[in-house]
Structure formats: structure tokens, C-alpha cells
Image (spheres, helix red, strand yellow):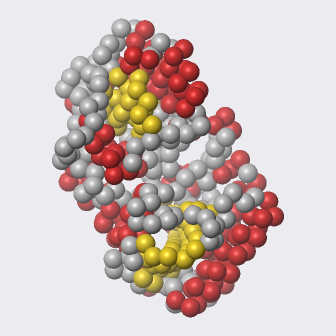
Amino acid sequence: MRVGLVTPGFSASETDWCIPALLDFVRTLARDHDVYVLALRYPSPAARYQVHGATVETLGGGARRGLSRLGLLAHAVVRLRRETRRRGLEVLHALWAHEPGAVVTRVGRDLGVPSVVSILGGELVALPGAAYGGQLSWSNRYLTRTALEHADAVTVGSSRLQSQARRYTDTAKISLAPLGVDTQRFSPDATEGGPRLAGSPSLLCVASWVPVKDQATLLEALALTASRGALPDAHLHLVGSGPCEGDLRALTDRLGLDSCVTFHGEVPHERLPDYYRAADVCVLSSLFESQAMVVLEAAACGRVTIGTRVGLLGELGELAELAELAEMDEAPAAVPSGEPRALAALLTTTLRQPPWPQVRGRARLVSDYGLQPATDRFVSLYRRLLAHPRPGS
């Protein structure tokens, strides 16, 4: 099958983990299919090269806005139309619904080629306090609505996002198709030389240090547990980087948490499994997640994630097991976002004494969320669209 993918950014090489889940997806898809990737903004400058057998073309759009943005999208339409004709692309797939979705559905309509639009981020939300979400911009609202209206199929990575998507497009077009985790890279098998994480329990939060990830609420929750004398030996490990680092460090100092919080900074993607395995429990405090790959990565390494009710958190089978292990049959495994007291109560109830909860059902995780099964779901969707073309195509 000949598949065209459009994305805001893609890896500059096989060792560039620009968007790890997309690199893994393309690597797996390109094993058996002819794959062309059009990257609108990253990397720069414009180039054409090969990654894992896929042909990648980048337009080098960078941070173009306004009229310059319109020029970028027009250029993308021209390039994708030309490549679709030249390569005989059979399916076009937008990874993100705003710019990629608008480009893919326009070319799909023009040439009668089936189009898939995957909602992979905050295209459907508006969080002004965190300066996050596609619905904050009229242009992104227009692009997203147009893409979802004209797509032949729409995919989402979690049931929560599926409910949101139903407000924007026909329910029949929407499929639950999360991106998959590489369960060979992310596994419970320990490697030599991994980090040692302090604390009992040691808590790990892997997320960019940006407002929507809301590590501030996590720090406030940890301070509340300390003020109540709960979890006296807990230690929080923050992995990531971003513009909020200074504010988070200042908050840590103000809350008196310097002795029980460690900022590890950015960790190379290939080293993340060692951090998951070294932790007792993972914590997610985001205001929004479309899927939350970190939940899958942690689970593949045998670690349960608790935290806010976003993305896949609470939808995985191992969290039902968490309630049994922690003797909290009536308590939730996830709490509303932005509520330090609720998160503190969850931490205290779940982690008040060892043994810490562990993932037991890894076989189901591999079969439902592994990289190959996830890629096969997309291929099956492509084949269904080709077998049942839309009227007039």
C-alpha cells in the first residue's frame, strides 16, 4: 500500500526523537508499505531524505504565522497533490487535525483519495490559563472543523477524546486508534547502569515543563501530604525540560520541598525505560492529554501511573487492578485536573504503605497497545476506506 502522511514535524534522522511515537509508527508502517511523509514545519531548512525506508520531505515552515502561514499551507497542498499523483498514493493520513488535516482533506477531495485525520493533541480544547489548545485561535478552529468535516475517517487515542470529537464530526467516522508503544524498548527487563531514584516511594513524572502539564499542582499536592505527615519518605523525580523550569524550582523552594524533589532535566528517549523501571509509581498531573504516551510507556515497564483524569489514564486495565492492590475499591485511580487536594488524597490513599502497585496484565497491554497491533489497526482502516470508497471518488 502507498500511504502519504502529513505532520507538523518529523525526525531529521533515525536517531532524532522529534516525536518518538511518530518515528516508531513510520518505522513499523514502512516495513511493509511505501510511505511518504510531508513535514510542514520541522526540521528546517527544506529537505528530502529517507528515514527507516520512508521518504520524508520537509517544507521548513518553522514558526510561520499570518499570511506566511497561508503560503505554507498552499505550498503543502501543491506538494502533496504532486506527490500523490507521482507516487500513486492510495491513502492520505493527517497526523494532527489542524494544518495537516486541512492539507490532507483538501488534496483528498481534489484527487478522490481517501483521507484519515488523527486528533493527536489539543485541537478540540481551549485552556486559556495554560495558553494551550487549538480552540483558542479562530484560524485553528476553522482548519480543524474543515478537516473533520471532510475527512473520510477520524481517529482518536482515548475514549475521552472520542467523546469530544463527536461534537465536531459524524460519530460513524470516528475510530479509537491510539498510537502504540514499543514494548521491546519499554519493558520490565532491567539493564545495567540504570539510575537509582531516591524515595519510598519514588515518584516519577515524565512530561515537558509547560503549563498544560501542570507540575505545579503535583508539587502542591506533595506539600499537602507532607503537611499531614503522610508519605514522609516519598521523593518526586521530574524528568523533562521547558519554559516553566524556573517557576517550578521557585515553587519547590517556596513549599519547602527541596529535599524531596529532584529535577533530572531532559533524558534521552532511549534512556527513559531505565527511569520508569527505577521508579515505584509514576504520576501524571496534566490539565489535558489526548492519549498520554507516558502512561503506556510506564505500563510497558511494569509501572502504574496515577494522577489526573486525562487521556488513557483510567482507561487501562491495570488501573482496575490498582484499586484491588491498594485496597481502595471505591476510590478513583484518577482525579480531576488542577485540584491539589484531590491529588494529595489520591497519593496518600494509594501509596500509604508498600507494596506499591504493579502492572500485572502486560500481555493485554502488548496486544492492545503494542506498536505492531496499533500500526495494524491503521492499516486495517486504510484498507476499509479503499474497499468502500466515498460516493463520487
- Position of 170 with respect to 311 (left or right) is right
Q: Nearer the viewer, residue 373 or 239?
A: 239
Q: Where is residue 81 in the image (x, y as percent from the top left)?
A: 63, 84
Quarter of the picture holding the N terminus: bottom left
Residue located 34% across and 52% down the image: 270
Whether residue 53 is visible: yes
Instruction: From this view, report whether residue 9 is shown above or below residue 122.
Output: below
Q: Position of residue 194 (x, y in %)?
A: 25, 40
Q: How many marks?
A: 0
Q: Where is residue 117 in the image (x, y as percent from the top left)?
A: 55, 67
Q: Nearer the viewer, residue 355 or 238?
A: 238
* Image quadrant in which you'd find residue 358: top left
Whether residue 320 is visible: no
Residue located 44% across and 60% down the image: 16
- Position of 78 with respect to 31 (left or right) is right
Instruction: From this view, report whether residue 119 is shown above or below residue 198.
Output: below
Q: Position of residue 61 (x, y in %)?
A: 67, 65
- Position of 237 with respect to 339 (left or right) is left
Q: Which of 171 and 140 is in front in this view?
A: 140
Residue located 46% across and 21% down the image: 221
